Amino acid sequence: MTGAEPDEALGIAYRLTAAIVEDSPARIAPLYDLCLAHLLRAAHHGEDDLRAAVGYWRQLRPLVAADNPARAEIFGRAAILVSKTVLRLADAAGVEEVIADLGIAIDGIAECELRDHPMLTRAQLRAARFRELGGGDEDRQHTVETLTDPGAARRRHRDPRCLPRRTPLPHPAEGPARRALERTR
């Protein structure tokens, strides 16, 4: 969506949510679209759209049933969308909710490359919460463990074609990410 498209998407999504019973799971898709459209509009319209996006995200969360087969994906995608927004708004409760939703996504997604994005987003949020919102040492420790997990590089580089010949995999525990995080102690 670019240009006027977020406004068009907003109009359609508003009409859909108004036509669907308030506690119906059928509202998940239009609420997700409202969240996304407000995030896109925020670049031109400011913080009110950011707050609206977070509000629509909060409305869709309880509509996703625990037995919904797409629950992990819905929670992961929506949480990744609003992760930077809750930080920008310094919304400590929102950060906590996003971290919880990313945990649901990580637990519900099979061990594969698809888990990396929610895992890294959660680590980034916990690092930001530690630095900017007074998070505890467990946030720093979780971030260090996630970013220095030796298995993470191997999971991301399972296909040897993505590496030059005879290139050893770097050990993340010795990399710049660990050194940078250790300096925060």
Image (cartoon, rainbow, N blue to C red):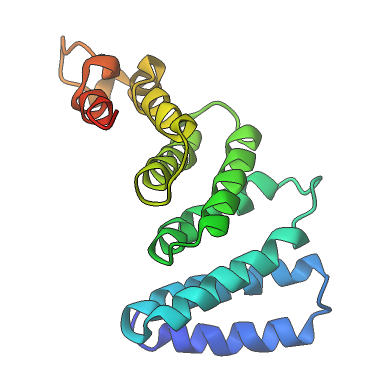
Q: Is residue 172 above or below residue 82?
A: above
Left or right position of 35 against 175? right
Q: Is residue 150 above or below residue 6?
A: above
Residue in view at x 69 percent, y 48 percent: 71
Left or right position of 84 against 110? left
Residue in view at x 64 percent, y 74 percent: 30
Left or right position of 146 against 183? right
Question: Quarter of the image holding residue 180?
Answer: top left
Q: Is residue 103 above or below residue 39?
A: above
How far across and how far down the image is residue 162, in percent?
Answer: 25, 26
Residue situated in front as seen by the camera: 130 or 148 = 130
Number of on-image labels: 0
Left or right position of 153 against 5? left
Residue in view at x 46 percent, y 80 percent: 49
Q: Is residue 101 above or below residue 185?
A: below
Residue situated in front as seen by the camera: 157 or 63 = 63
Can you say which quadrant of the picture contains the N terminus?
Answer: bottom left
Question: Quarter of the image holding residue 19?
Answer: bottom right
Can you say which quadrant of the picture contains the C terminus?
Answer: top left
Question: Quarter of the image holding residue 62?
Answer: bottom right
Residue in view at x 60 percent, y 42 percent: 105
How far across and how far down the image is residue 167, in percent?
Answer: 16, 13
Residue situated in front as seen by the camera: 101 or 96 = 96
Q: Is residue 78 visible?
A: no
How far across and how far down the image is residue 6, in percent?
Answer: 44, 82
How far across and how far down the image is residue 2, in percent?
Answer: 35, 79
Q: Is residue 52 visible?
A: yes
